[in-house]
Image (spheres, rainbow, N blue to C red):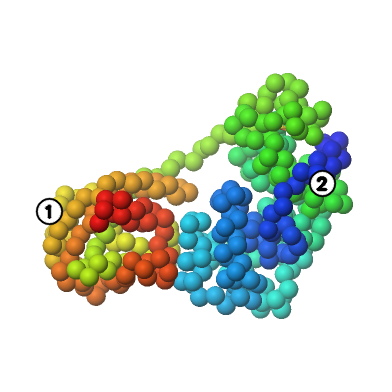
Amino acid sequence: MQEIITPLLGWFALNKRELPWRQDRQPYHVWVSEIMLQQTRIEAVKKYYARFMEAVPDVRALSEIGDDALLKLWEGLGYYSRARNLKKAAVTVMEDYGGSFPRGFREIKALAGIGDYTAGAIASICFNERVPAVDGNVLRVIARVTGSRENVLLPEVKKRVTQQLSSIMPPQAGDFNEALMELGELVCLPNGEPDCAACPLQPHCAAFREGLTAELPVRIKKLRRGRAEKTVFLLTDVDGRIAIEKRAGQGLLAGMYQLPNDDGYYSEGEIREILGSRGLSPVSVVFLGEAKHVFTHIDWFMKGYRVTVENPCGRYLWAKDSELQTDYALPTAFQKILKMDKSSGN
Ligand code: SF4
């Protein structure tokens, strides 16, 4: 393992990409980008990052932003609890650290929404602390270099890789960690397609030597996913305003706005009955189609209906289409229903 340090750092110096959050190594920039990168690829994150930094340029601004504005900024990235934790951590940085980001791995990890990986990335990249930052890219590279057949999805395997990297961590810890991630992103690609010919670690790589690049890393998932069937209502009044409501403060998509929906599938007659019991008189019920949305532990199988009603009831908030674009963060799952409606020509 020791032998990978010099070629890796040399390769990184020549090949690292110019990324917006790498310009100055400020913890705020690295932190926000790392949280965004947990769920989205680098190219897609660039536009979200630029939008976020323009609206929320520093920790103070983040600690003061309203919840609805924050969720609107996060729209499209999913996993809204991450946005909420960003704000929570920003409040802690303002209150407990006078607005200066804490410098040590332990203090950083104690902030809301920050785990071992993100704390390691910030501590090493911004403060050069000699701690690893082990994400999926790093696990893949190390499993291949060492020829390990262990399941990289197991916490104990991740722990062992973290220890291995700790024991060889050079003084240029930030560069070393970034170089491993960058190699995983650009060269040692997943799904058996690494570009070994362009890899600086090839002379030290067991997977390359033994022809195991397609088999490693071993990833065995145990997770059993949930499934939910839902009927989603695109309720509009005669002025074209759309009904939305706020979800409960706990659980999936907590506190987000949503289109009204019910668990299960229903016939047109049943839909009229359900909405009638809520004080609404449907003028028309039109089936829009089906859509699937994948969350971390559950898949939603949705059937969407456009229902025009005569009398908008006070149970819902009735928003104009333009307000949905600017004021209310509607999760991607429900945007799929809006999209189906638009493409149906309504
Ligand atoms: Fe990955 Fe190939 Fe490099 Fe080994 S030689 S680390 S498999 S890209």
- Residue at 51 percent across and 69 percent down: it is 70
Quarter containing ligand 1? top right
Determine crowd level at label 1: few under 14, some 14-19, many 20+ residues with C-alpha closer than 10 A.
few
Q: Residue furthest top?
A: 210
Say if residue 203 shows up in the picture. Answer: yes
Quarter of the figure with the N terminus: top right
Residue 301 percent coordinates (x, y): 33, 46
Q: Is residue 79 above or below residue 256?
A: above
Circles 1 and 2: CB distance less than 8 Å?
Answer: no
- What element does badge 2 sit on? helix
Disc sitting over residue 269 in the figure: 1
Question: Which residue is the site of mark 2?
Answer: 13
Q: Is residue 124 left or right of residue 184?
A: right
**In the depicted view, which residue is nearer to us: 133 or 333?**
333
Return the x and y of residue 258 as percentages of the image width and height: 35, 62
Q: Residue at x 66, y 42 (%)?
A: 185
Q: Amino acid at mark 1?
A: Gly
Tag 2: amino acid: Ala
Residue 145 is left or right of residue 112, and the answer is right
**Secondary structure beneath label 1:** helix
Query: Can residue 109 be seen in the rendering of this structure?
Result: no
